[in-house]
Amino acid sequence: MKIFKNSTVKIISIVLLVLSGGIFFMSLPKLFSKILTKIVDAIPTEPMYDADGKMIYQDDRHTIASFGKRKEFDIWKNGSKGEVSWILFDRDKNKEIDRIDRYTLSPSKLIVYTIGEKGYTKLNSETAEVIQSKDINLFSEEDIKIFKELEAGKGGIKHQK
């Protein structure tokens, strides 16, 4: 249409559109406030916690354990009743490190050892260093001993499917 090519007509039509929207919201303040209240109420603001005091996220994520000075590493239990997985997660990078079956802490509580989909994982929660390998022989003798004990079910926590 040739009429909308004129810049004056464009400006007038935009002004009328804005004014009509403002008049609509002013004429229906109760309806608008009810809609706005419902939207704000639907936004979850209070975190929920399970019986152990661990945070429950809206997507059925439960924090099983947190590590590091600022608790920047977590193990999450994720999923519903039918299909549950455990995830070793780096909160600073907002990234999954591995889906794990079992984990344990070193005696100093600074190193987390896990066995999962990516093999063996050694996480130093103090330095944020992550070493992962499917080959256990790439780790130190002390680490291999801890991984073997973890595989045998001695110590650590095993994921119950």
Image: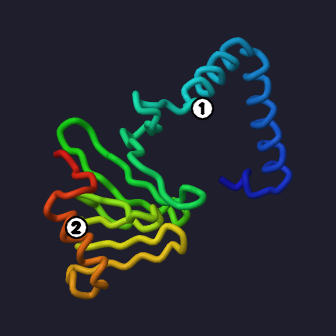
Give the Cα separation between the discs numbered 2 and 1: 34 Å
Per the image, label 1 sits on a secondary structure element best described as loop
User: Can you name the residue that lies furthest to the bottom here?
Assistant: 138
Colouring rule applied to residues? rainbow
Between tags 2 and 1, which lies in front? 2
Q: Residue at x 53, y 33 (%)?
A: 47
Residue 81, given in percent of the width and then of the height, sits at: 22, 35
- Looking at the rendered structure, the kind of residue marked 2 is Glu
Residue 38, given in percent of the width and then of the height, sits at: 59, 21
Say above or below: 158 vs 13.
below
Tell me how many marks there are.
Answer: 2
User: Can you name the residue that lies furthest to the right here?
Assistant: 8
Residue 28, given in percent of the width and then of the height, sits at: 72, 15
Disc 2 to disc 1: CB gap under 8 Å: no
Residue marked by disc 1: 45
- Looking at the rendered structure, the kind of residue marked 1 is Thr
Query: In the rendered view of the protein, which quadrant contains the C terminus?
Result: top left
Q: Residue at x 26, y 60 (%)?
A: 100
Q: Which mark is residue 19?
A: none
Residue marked by disc 2: 117
